[in-house]
Amino acid sequence: MKLISFFLLTLTITYSQVNFENYFENKTLRLDYFHSGDKENDYYSFDELIEEPYWGGSKVNLIDKFNYGKYKFEVYDVASNQLIYSRGYSTIFNEWQTTEEAKNTTRTFNETVVFPFPQNPVLVKFYASNRKSEWIHKFEYEVNPENYFIKPERISEYKNFEVLNSGDPSEKVDIVIIPEGYTKDQMNLFKEDSEKFAGYLFNSSPFRENKDKFNIWGVEAASIESGTDIPKENIWKKTLINSTLYTFDLERYLMTYDNKTLRNIASNAPYDQIYILVNSDKYGGGAIYNHYSVCVNDNKYSEFVFVHEFGHGFASLADEYYTSDVAYEEFYPLDVEPTDPNLTTLIDFDSKWKDLVEDNTPIPTPDTDDYKNKVGAFEGGGYMEKGIYRPTHDCTMKSIKVDGFCPVCKRAIQEMIDFYSE
C-alpha cells in the first residue's frame, strides 16, 4: 500500500552533502511526535526524544535527493543555519486521510523520525506535500543534545542476531526483521524464517546483484501468543506490536498502529528499514515508504508479498494494479505527477522514465501483444483505471510475479541501494 502527490522535479534543490564528523555522533536521536487530524486537516505535537545506541544510516548521503514521500523533515544546525540532514517518508496517517472514515472523525497517530545524534543544537522542520505538490511547513522543534530529558533508557532490550553481515552499517542497507506473533518457544522458527526470507529478497533482481550491499538483522522479541489479530473473525492475539489484518477494513492489509513499541524493538539493531514478519498463514502484508514493511511467514504467496512490499517501503514504488478493492479515495490527483518513480500522469513524463522508452513506442502505449515486453506508458495503476500510467504491461508491483520487477522499478531500487551504500 502506498502514497502520494508530487513535488515538481524541475523545482528540486540540489544540496551538497555535509561531513558527518562535523555535526554528528555515531548513534541515533529519535524524535517521536503525534500526528492528528481528519481528511482535510492535520497538526503535529511533540512526544519525546530518545537516544538509541546504533546509527545504521549512511554517513555520506545525509541529504535526501529523491523527494519521495508525502512528508519530509529537515535538520538544521542552529548556529550556522546549515541543512545537515533530511529524509522523505510517508506514514499510515496520510493513507488514513484518504479513507471514508477520515471524512467523519479525527484520529491521532504516533510517528517517528530518526537522524544521527547531533553534537550541537539543531532545529528539526517538518513539511507535508499538499494536493498541488507544494511543500507546506507544518511544525518545527529545536533539540539541544545536552537536554537531560533525552531518554537513554532502553524500554525493550532484546538480543539481536545476524542474518547477513556484509560490513559496516554506514556503507550498507541495513534491514532489521521484527518478529510478530512468534512465542518464546518459536524463536528458532523466527530465525529460520529470517534466513528463508532473506533468501527470498535475493532471489529477485536487482537485489540479487547487490547482496553484498545489505546487512540483515533479527531481534529475538517474543509475543505471548502466536498469530495476528483478525477482527472480522473475532480473533484477537496478544502479540508484541499489535498487528492486525483488516487495517482500514481491508482484509489483506496487515499493519500496526503501535509505532512506539515497534521502534523500541527495532532500536536493538542498526537499521535503515524495518521489516515485520508475522507468524501467520493468512494472505496479508503492507508497507509504507521509510516507515515499515509487513509480510506473513507461511502463505503460498509469501515470497511475492515480501519482495513486493519491500519495493514500497524501501524505494517508494507504487502499486501498479487498478482492479483490486482498496480503502483509498482519490489517492492520486491527476493534475500533477505522482512522486512515486513508477507512476506517471504524463504531466511531466520527461521527469519520469521517458529516457527508457524506445523511439517507436507510442505514449500512451496500447496494452497489446506488440508492446507486452516494452517499456512505455500503459494506462491503469495506483488503484485507478484511468489517468494514471505504469511503465510496462506487468511487473512485481502489479501482480503476483516473483523476480519480475520492470526496468523502471529496477532502476529506482538500484538508485536507492546506491544511496545507502556509497
Image: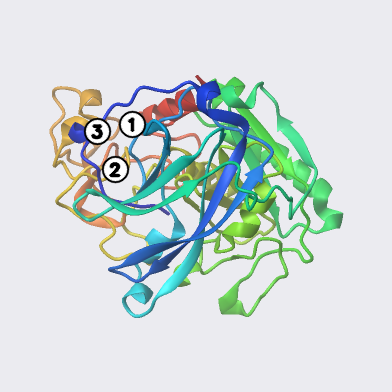
Q: What residue is shown at x 30% (from left), y 31% (from top)?
A: 373
Residue at x 66%, y 65% (from the top left corner):
228
What label does residue 339 carry, if any?
2
Location of residue 7 by image quarter: top left
Q: Height in image: 363 above or below 112?
A: above
Quadrant holding the N terminus = bottom left
Badge 2 amino acid: Thr
List the single residue furthest toward the right: 185
Residue 278 at x, y = what percent? 66, 55
Q: Secondary structure at mark 1?
A: helix
Which of the two discs, 1 and 2, labels the residue nearer the N terminus? 2
Mark 1 closeness class: few <14, some 14–19, many ≥20 residues within 10 Å: many
Nearest-to-viewer mark from 3 and 1: 3
Q: Give percent across and percent down for residue 295.
A: 58, 52
| Circle 1: residue type | Val
Q: Secondary structure at mark 3?
A: loop
Q: Residue at x 17, y 30 (%)?
A: 350
Few, some or many C-alpha atoms within 10 Å of disc 3 (few <14, some 14-19, many ≥20)?
A: few
Of circles 1 and 2, the one toward us is: 2
Tally of marks = 3
The circle on residue 12 is 3
Q: Is residue 302 left or right of residue 129?
A: right
Q: Which mark is residue 408?
A: 1
Comparing labels 2 and 3, the label whose residue is closer to the camera: 3
Real-space Cα separation, disc 1 to disc 2, in angstroms: 14 Å
